[in-house]
Image (cartoon, grey):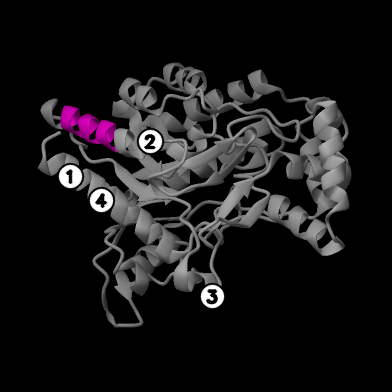
Amino acid sequence: MKYSWRWYGPNDPVSISDVRQTGAYEIVTALHHIPNGDIWSIEEIKKRMREVEWDTKNNCATGLKWTVVESVPVHEDIKKRVGNYLQYIENYKQSLRNLSKCGIYNVTYNFMPVLDWTRTDLYFELPSGARALKYDHIAFAAFELFLLKRKGAKIGYTEKEKAEAKKYLITLTDDKKTELIKTIIAGLPGAEEGFTLEEFSKVLEGYDCIDADTLRSNLIKFVGEIAPIAQEVNINLAIHPDDPPRPILGLPRVMSNIEDVDALLTSVPIKNNGLCLCAGSFGVNEDNDLIKILEKYGDRVHCMHLRSVKREGKDFYEDEHLAGSTDLVFLIKAVIDEERRRKAAGEKIIEIPIRPDHGHQIIDDLRKKTNPGYSCIGRLKGLAEIKGIATAIEKLNL
């Protein structure tokens, strides 16, 4: 496995000097400052490459290399196929060409409408005192029903859930209500856009006439346009699953289970059209068999996020990497088996880039300003555990 680390650039609280000490040797990053839909220029790409490869603090080479883009965002007009979407698709193609010219050949993206990922609590305190990301279904219902007041929201909840949401809302101070709103819609690490409550309502209305079939069709058309370019310039495209993998806010979801993966990968059978297998996102749905997905589409899994969530009914939170509802030990064994298959088959790309994802905020990081889910020590712990499991499997030839 290629051990990678997500880095948000020079403004990331975890500096590139810190990353040098983690045990990762590849960087996953993006040009977050470039507006969605704009072309990523060669100049901007090379600037980020230099920031990855040279430690200005210590005036030395880092030994790190930017190998995975996460993400080149897909403009909302492309998802809806409205407005200037044709130009945005052409811009996307040019960004792929430019990345390839700079020697970056792995691009992750998602096709989630409006929000990249959704949580209701960025600082959920665990019994140990560590903090984790959490999605609370009743808290989300309170937001949608009584703070956002989305038209049609009531049909998505049972009478019991609506009553519990109303009761929950009464317990919140005004500051807590503001915090809940901000957590859901103002943008999380990796999200490309943030909204006010009023802006958010208007953006949601843009999807009123788009159901899952329409969004899936739009996804397939988009990938059908960009995958041949990716093949031409030797870039692997990796779609990230929905997070969480269920409809929210009346928005359709089209990358939540193996059937969704089947639909995209069979409709655009170019091998460069592949998957980012996120164990946490797929793992929220207990019906998803991660090993089955990996075994079926191993040659088209272009990168992976290794984390585990703890499911509690419709709620979930980020658990220890080696705990929770997803057994990463068996998944890591399946990754190694896939890499062995690739090697035996003589394939060009053998190792799969993986990264520890959404680590807990622990120890000294509890006293620091961190990006929620992306503090240093928790991810470092997860990476060490992942490497330990992989090393044991390989050394013992299991």
N-terminal of the pair, mark 2 or mark 1, is: 2
> How far apart in space, not on screen, are marks 2 and 4 (Cα)?
15 Å
Q: Earlier in the sequence, mark 1 or mark 4?
A: 4
Q: Earlier in the sequence, mark 1 or mark 3?
A: 3
Write down the residue under mark 2.
327
Image position of 31 with respect to 109: above or below: below
Gap between marks 1 and 3 measured at Cα:
34 Å
Give left or right: position of 305 versus 219: left
In the drawing, what numbered circle is on residue 367?
Answer: 3
- The quadrant holding residue 105 is top left
What whole-number distance in Å separates the C-alpha atoms at marks 1 and 4?
8 Å
CB-based contact (under 8 Å), mark 2 and mark 1: no
Helix, strand or loop under label 2: loop
Task: Estimate the x, y position of residue 295 in percent, counting from the top left.
Answer: 31, 23
What percent of the width, then of the height, locates residue 56? 35, 80
Let me know if residue 317 appears in the view.
Answer: yes
* Type of amino acid at the residue the image marks with label 2: Asp
What secondary structure predominates along the stretch shown in magenta? helix
The disc at residue 392 is 1
Quarter of the image holding residue 376? Answer: bottom left
Amino acid found under the numbered disc labelled 4 = Lys
Q: Dot 2 surroundings within 10 Å: few (below 14), some, or many (20 or more)? A: some
Q: Residue at x 40, y 67 (%)?
A: 47
Residue at mark 4 to residue at mark 3: CA–CA distance: 27 Å
Q: Position of residue 121 (x, y in %)?
A: 66, 53
Residue range in magenta is: 332-342
Of badges 1 and 4, the one in the foreground is: 1
Q: In the visual, does 392 lie left or right of 298?
A: left
Q: Which residue is mark 4?
A: 387
- What amino acid is labelled 3 in the image? Arg
* Sequence-first tag of 2 and 3: 2
